[in-house]
Image (cartoon, rainbow, N blue to C red):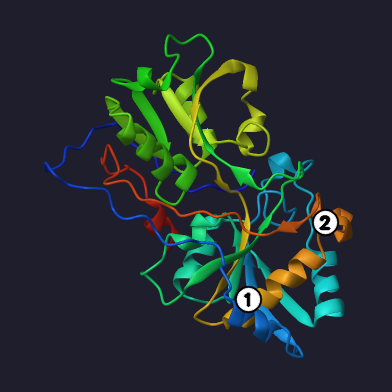
Amino acid sequence: MKTCWSALAVLGLCATHACGETRLPVDEESALVADSAVADDVTAAPKPLRLKIAVNDIYCSKTACSCISKIATRSFDTVVANLQARHQITLELTYFMEVFDLQKALRANQYDGVLCKPWTALQYKGKTPARFKRVADLLDPDDKALMSGVFLTLAGSSVRTLADVQGKRLALGQEDAYEKHQAPLIMLEAGHIQPSAQVFFSSCGENLNALMDGTVDVAVVSSYALSASCAVDFAKAEDFRTLAQTEKMPLTSLLVDLAKIPAAEAVRLQAALLDVSGAQAPKDLLGKGFVLPASWRPVLPVVAVGTAKPAGPTVEEAAK
């Protein structure tokens, strides 16, 4: 199992806010949207394109946890070769097993693009010179492109609906995990639901452990947690009850930095990825490959409910 920087979080009381404070605005569209002028530029005779791409993919054999090695056997070798042979596009892939190492590289603005859960890159908007846009989403082995956050409780718990989270102890993800942090907080805010305390962990496994050992009453995990994460070592779906799911969002996307790559080349890359996918997708992609990016505009909650500082390193501290 790969090493995790565990935020040994402590329980904290819910934060209160000044009257009249409003939600932060909806973020801009995260998917690449090409206008007609950009599309016309793509028809010009293409020149060789070389891009440095950082990779952290749940199902890739070079970046996944060893505990799901039988599931995570994806390779990008064939699709990279096809892009080069058919489209004169060379992707130089650097694999990051630890997401914290990837985040450090992204903050240092070292890559032209990244293949990962999109919020991993989009969270740095305005904090680095990068302007990341999703050029394509990558399908999982079941040919699904979307995921969500899931509110779970134990199968025998008296907690049966999302409304029952009121006054209960809740485990969430840290701020770098949109489906386990921002999205569930927005749902709680919309439903005027106030847990009694929150704890913020770095992984689905830690959240489930906290639920199973009685530290919390409800835990939010990624929708793939019980099938493609380290939690498969100790947790079974029948042991839990699903209370609610957040909005759906892309699981894995290839994003390019438009501060480094012209929009026309980004559109060209998008078309090339689609060309080597679908019926043309190699078997080592574990599915039909890349699809057009689904529309997704991340929204930030007014504030992270329950703002007690973890006892261990934060995500930012661990990545330094």
Q: Secondary structure at mark 1?
A: helix
Q: Secondary structure at mark 2?
A: helix
Q: Is residue 21 left or right of residue 170?
A: left
Identify the mark at residue 266; answer none if there is no mark: 1
The residue at the point 59 percent across, 42 percent down is: 147
Inspect the image, locate mark 2, and give the three-letter code of the amino acid beneath it.
Gly
Measured from the top left, where is residue 287 in percent x and y?
A: 80, 49
Quadrant (top left, top right, bottom left, bottom right) of the C terminus? bottom left
Label tally: 2
Instruction: Tell which of 173 and 69 is nearer to you.
Output: 173
Instruction: Tell which of 320 and 19 is nearer to you.
Output: 19
Query: Residue 184, relative to residue 5: is it above or below?
Result: above
Between the C-alphas of marks 1 and 2, the distance is 20 Å
The residue at the point 84 percent across, 72 percent down is: 81
Measured from the top left, where is residue 82 in percent x and y?
A: 85, 71
Task: Find disc 2 in the rendering and name its residue.
Answer: 278
Q: Is residue 314 shown to the viewer in this render?
A: yes
Measured from the top left, where is residue 104 in percent x and y?
A: 47, 66
